[in-house]
Amino acid sequence: MKVLLIGAGNMGLTYGEGMAKSALLNRRNLMVFDKSAEIITNLSKVDYFDVYDNIEECLPDADVVFLAVKPYHVDSLFEEIKPLVNKEQIFVSLMAGVTIAKIQEGLGITKVIRSMPNLPAQVGKGVTSFTESKEVSRVELLMVRNLLDTTGASIHVETENFIDASTGISGSGPAYVFYFMNSMLEAALKMGFTKNDSKVLVSQTFEGAVELFNQSDLSPETWMERVASKGGTTRAALDSMDDNNVKELIKDAAYAAFDRAVELGEE
């Protein structure tokens, strides 16, 4: 299996690293195409990449092509590569808001898998939702899923609507967590903790809470009740959040990201 990555930015390179370091490529190097001279120079030093600045030298040989360019570059990219593609190739999109139909029409191909990655893929803790056009076979879908899993976990969804929805949950979700963490860090600093102690208090609290959740079947509501005793400190904090409608505001934020993903697909 020959895999080509088009676009070696942060997210593209994250998946490139995961795939290239796995055993899935059968000792073949991952092919990488990018137009940045700096990226070409840097990646040429990596022994598990074959790096190209000429798309004609790599695209025709690829079995699977990952598209990881910025969405506003797709039209010019499609115009450039359309003469080089063939209908047996599988195109996997890591681009937000670019629909399967747009990729099929732009490239004149049928086999497309659209995915929504997220930032924790950089540390092997990512979650990627994905769906496919009807022309992709089960064997091909499994092959691509294994590639996506090299950066964490993957979730197959039935329609593109769930790709847009997962944008609001997992795609943008890490930023919500960082937002909450930042608020707690600011509170800790205001209380007099040092910057380093604040970071340890907040990061370990998040990591520990997630681990507790993952290692049990208990719901978040149950865990909250276990921590919060009547009239206690935690109950005071949770009551404050409820009084300020924090839960609904977080839901609104997730839907705002979802709605924007849909808008991007229509532009």
Image (cartoon, rainbow, N blue to C red):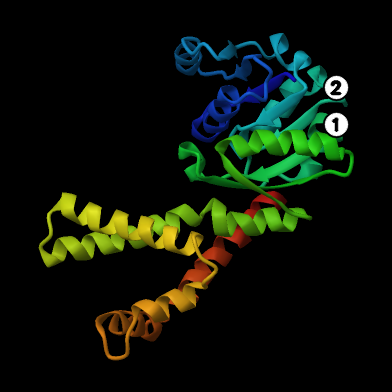
Q: Position of residue 26 (x, y in %)?
A: 69, 18
Quadrant (top left/top right/bottom left/bottom right) for the N terminus: top right
Amino acid on which the number 1 mark rests in the picture: Ile
How many other residues sit within 10 Å of disc 1, few (<14), some (14-19) or many (≥20)? some
Residue drawn 77% across and 38% down? Answer: 142
Nearest the camera: 5 or 36?
Answer: 5
Instruction: Name the residue tied to disc 2.
Output: 86
In three-dimensional space, the C-alpha distance between marks 1 and 2, rounded to whole angstroms, equals 7 Å
Residue farthest to the front, as pictured: 216
Q: Where is residue 226 in the image (x, y as percent from the top left)?
A: 39, 79
Amino acid on which the number 2 mark rests in the picture: Asn
Q: Would you say the residues marked 1 and 2 are in contact, meaning their CB atoms lie under 8 Å apart?
A: yes
Taking 247 as reference, is 227 left or right?
Answer: left
Taking 96 as reference, is 184 left or right?
Answer: left
Residue farthest to the left, as pictured: 192
Instruction: Name the residue tied to disc 1.
Output: 109
Taking 207 as reference, is 222 left or right?
Answer: right
Q: Is mark 1 on a helix, strand or loop?
A: loop
